């Protein structure tokens, strides 16, 4: 398939993610969304490029900022909105919310509010694939801040020692809440991985869905051959850490870097393609929101099921 056809496919999914999150922004003041939200607006190219570079059976373990990965992996939109609404029709019956989206049937195994906590789960899944001789890979997605957690280092070590098929994907938006990466970290991620004998690569053009996809295909090929790999992808978070607003008024960053990123963002630059797809995608979102609105709230029995 030509790059142009792939680009259109990736663009459509990335635009769906952005329009879904813009709908979340619009709905949020109504208080119908019963969950804190960590928006990935600006970061969509990472989710779509990575997921498109995987095989459908590969498993992804993600974070609280994972609407994009859920959608890019093919998670159902109606059950996602119902989940955000806290309704019975939600993918986890309304009990998980935005930070814990999971759709195992499409390979989005889970996401978690606890920073770095899904990284060892991906390593464990990869170990299981290896032991059972299953030709699939597991992907751990995490932010730059998560690499400061001890479990990240333990996971690299274990993956390297056991030679498990795991792809570590760092979404480097340069921020952990309001804190910039250089004041938090004394290491470069790819060099750091090399000290464990793990190959890695940093992609600077994290706005470029095709570049992210190509890098993922290459990295995944290494992983399928039995070696873990660290893929670090530069990206930009346009909105505040948590919530639906912007955060430039806190003065920990200016809008300059975000504006520079927006000037390369295909969802903004390729306005004609976006306009040609918007009505159809908004109709999909309308249907998903209508499903959530019509879904009943869980009762006592459903609320207590699966939690003890
Ligand atoms: C174990 C743990 N420590 C601290 C927090 C509070 N916390 C939530 S998000 C976050 C920053 C994480 O930054 P990063 O991994 O770069 O992800 P991003 O939010 O930028 O996507 C922190 C410290 C938490 N949720 N879990
Ligand atoms: Mg970050």
Image: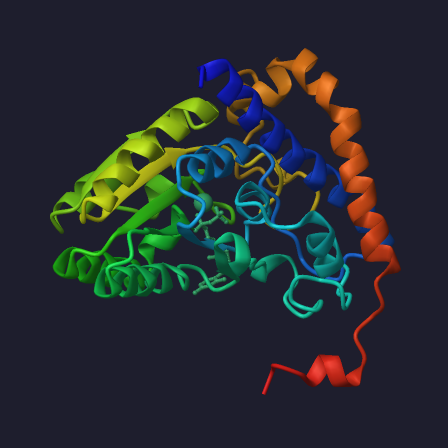
Q: Quick one: 18 or 258, which is closer to the camera?
A: 18
Q: Residue furthest top?
A: 272
Q: Residue at x 63, y 37 (%)?
A: 17
Asked if residue 187 shows in the view, the reply is no
Tell me the quarter of the picture where residue 56 sits: top left
Q: Is residue 37 above or below residue 54?
A: below
Q: Residue at x 35, y 27 (%)?
A: 214
- 91 relative to 45 in the view: left or right: right
x and y percent of residue 92 in the render? Answer: 65, 67
Relative to residue 289, is residue 206 depicted above or below?
above
The quarter of the displayed image where residue 220 is located: top left
Q: Where does the image place residue 104, in percent across and percent down from the top left? A: 52, 60
Residue 234 is left or right of residue 18, and the answer is left
Q: Quadrant of the N terminus?
A: top left
Q: Quadrant of ligand 2?
A: top left
- In the rendered structure, the answer to whether residue 94 lies left or right of residue 124 reads right
């Amino acid at each position: 398939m030509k790059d142009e056809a792939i680009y259109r496919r990736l663009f459509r999914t990335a635009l769906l993610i952005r329009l879904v999150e813009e709908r979340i922004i619009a709905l949020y003041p109504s208080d119908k969304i019963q969950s804190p939200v960590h928006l990935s607006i600006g970061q969509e190219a990472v989710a779509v490029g990575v997921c498109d570079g995987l095989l459908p059976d590969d498993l992804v373990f993600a974070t609280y900022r994972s609407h994009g990965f859920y959608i890019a992996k093919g998670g159902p939109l109606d059950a996602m909105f119902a989940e955000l609404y806290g309704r019975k029709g939600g993918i986890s019956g309304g009990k998980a919310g935005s930070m814990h989206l999971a759709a195992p049937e499409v390979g989005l195994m889970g996401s978690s509010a606890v920073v770095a906590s899904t990284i060892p789960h991906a390593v464990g899944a990869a170990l299981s694939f290896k032991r059972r001789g299953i030709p699939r890979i597991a992907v751990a997605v995490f932010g730059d801040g998560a690499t400061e957690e001890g479990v990240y280092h333990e996971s690299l070590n274990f993956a390297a020692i056991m030679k498990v098929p795991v792809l570590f994907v760092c979404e480097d938006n340069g921020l952990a809440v309001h804190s910039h990466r250089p004041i938090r970290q004394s290491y470069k991620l790819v060099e750091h991985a090399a000290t464990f004998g793990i190959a890695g690569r940093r992609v600077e053009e994290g706005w470029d869905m095709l570049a992210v996809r190509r890098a993922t295909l290459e990295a995944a090929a290494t992983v399928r051959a039995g070696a873990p790999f660290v893929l670090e992808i530069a990206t930009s978070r346009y909105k505040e850490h948590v919530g639906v607003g912007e955060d430039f008024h806190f003065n920990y960053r200016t809008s300059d870097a975000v504006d520079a990123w927006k000037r390369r963002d295909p969802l903004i630059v390729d306005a004609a393609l976006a306009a040609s797809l918007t009505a159809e995608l908004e109709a999909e979102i309308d249907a998903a929101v209508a499903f959530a609105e019509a879904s009943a709230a869980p009762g006592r029995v459903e609320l207590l099921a699966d939690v003890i």
